[in-house]
Image: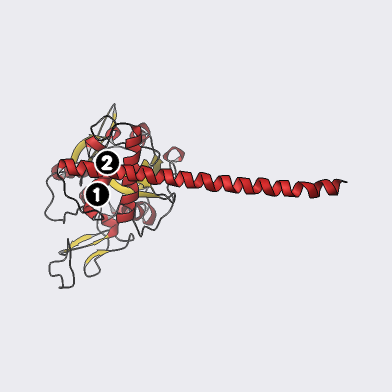
């Protein structure tokens, strides 16, 4: 009798499973459609802004992607907060963020390879000893680094190239002035894709095959790329500490001081966090930290004025 009951239940279980599968497919389809609409609506907001402001940017270009990246981190005030002519409500703000993140990743990070995962800052445990043999090679002066940031935040140093996306190039210049020596010597032309070296050196006589911006320099991506800089200083070497990520301005203020670096990360659709901007801490007071940057050139911008969300967070890097 029990076996007969079991046999009768099998069709019912199968029907239930089929219904669950169907509902899941419908839910996922609706969710994808909703995300697509969100992204499309964000694109329309950007297009309207560019049209009304008479700004000409070629879609798919690096300049366009950097403009979107600037929107993400509060660099375009009319597109970075609710209550403007272009961002009426929270939905508009979320649509802009979704469009900007997806497009920035597509254009700038299409071939991105994730590195070691970043822990949450709140779980950071102070090591027994920060210094090691490599660290003894350098003496980092926070005051010299901060002064360099103040001198060149809007007056680019002609000893270095200036890029469309110049934030990490600038931060590398700052910490070099603070006392860190370069590592590496170039591979013949422009950038070398490596985070085991950190250098920016003149290339005074480039060959005719060495084309593009910055052809009179050679550099490692450890110098110019946000995540590669982090990997060089905190994973390949113990020159700095990766304190982890946070979405709390107060946590950042507790753990960092002027002379440290903050990287701003965005969340890809595959769940990967990518460093998309780098800023340098130049000041602090009782209300928190202030940061300085290139690309969006600013001095002593309050960290809490940089917008965060579930898709945007801070990565904290502390120097000795």
Mark 2, other Cα within 10 Å: few <14 / some 14–19 / many ≥20: some
Extreme residue in the bottom direction:
208
Along the viewing direction, whichever of 184 and 140 lies nearer the viewer:
184
Tag count in the figure?
A: 2
Of circles 1 and 2, the one toward us is 2
Residue 39 is labelled as none
Circle 2 sits on which residue? 45
Q: Position of residue 131 (x, y in %)?
A: 37, 49
Q: Is residue 18 left or right of residue 149?
A: right
Instruction: Report which quarter residue 109 is drawn in.
Output: bottom left
Outermost residue to the right: 1
Q: Is residue 126 above or below residue 285?
A: below
In the image, 207: left or right of 87?
Answer: left
| Residue ID at (25%, 35%) | 86
Q: Position of residue 122 (x, y in %)?
A: 44, 37
Give the residue at mark 1. Answer: 66
Place of residue 68 in the rendered image (x, y in percent of width and height, measured from the top left): 26, 46
Q: Secondary structure at mark 1?
A: helix
Q: CA distance from mark 1 to mark 2?
A: 16 Å
Q: Nearer the viewer, residue 188 or 28?
A: 28
Instruction: Mark yes or no: residue 305 visible.
Output: yes
Percent from the top left, x then y, of residue 28?
50, 46
Q: Quadrant of residue 213?
A: bottom left
Q: Give the SS element for disc 2.
A: helix
The residue that appears at 11% across and 46% down in the rendered structure is 155
Q: Which of 265 and 118 lies nearest the eye of the viewer?
A: 265
Q: Residue at left 35%, top 49%?
A: 102
| Residue nearest the observer in this picture, 46 or 162 | 46
């Amino acid at each position: 009798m029990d076996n007969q009951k079991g046999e009768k239940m099998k069709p019912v279980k199968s029907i239930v499973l089929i219904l669950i599968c169907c509902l899941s497919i419908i839910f996922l389809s609706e969710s994808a459609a909703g995300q697509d609409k969100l992204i499309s609506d964000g694109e329309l907001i950007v297009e309207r802004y560019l049209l009304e402001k008479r700004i000409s940017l070629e879609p798919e270009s690096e300049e366009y992607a950097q403009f979107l990246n600037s929107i993400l981190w509060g660099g375009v005030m009319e597109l970075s907060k609710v209550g403007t002519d272009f961002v009426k409500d929270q939905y508009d703000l979320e649509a802009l963020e979704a469009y900007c993140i997806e497009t920035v990743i597509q254009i700038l990070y299409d071939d991105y390879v994730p590195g070691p995962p970043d822990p949450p800052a709140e779980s950071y445990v102070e090591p027994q000893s920060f210094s090691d043999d490599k660290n003894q090679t350098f003496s980092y002066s926070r005051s010299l680094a901060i002064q360099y940031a103040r001198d060149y935040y809007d007056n680019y140093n002609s000893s270095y190239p200036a890029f469309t996306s110049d934030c990490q190039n600038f931060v590398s210049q700052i910490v070099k002035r603070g006392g860190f020596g370069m590592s590496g010597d170039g591979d013949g032309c422009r950038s070398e894709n490596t985070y085991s070296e950190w250098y920016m050196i003149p290339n005074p006589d480039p060959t005719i095959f060495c084309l593009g911006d910055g052809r009179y320099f050679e550099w490692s991506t450890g110098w110019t790329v946000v995540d590669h800089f982090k990997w060089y200083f905190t994973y390949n070497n113990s020159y700095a500490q990766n304190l982890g990520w946070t979405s709390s301005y107060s946590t950042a203020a507790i753990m960092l001081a002027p002379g440290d670096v903050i990287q701003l990360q965005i969340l890809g659709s595959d769940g990967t966090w990518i460093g998309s901007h780098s800023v340098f801490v130049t000041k602090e007071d009782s209300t928190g930290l202030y940061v300085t940057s290139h690309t969006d050139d600013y001095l002593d911008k309050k960290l809490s004025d940089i917008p965060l969300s579930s898709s945007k967070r801070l990565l904290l890097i502390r120097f000795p």
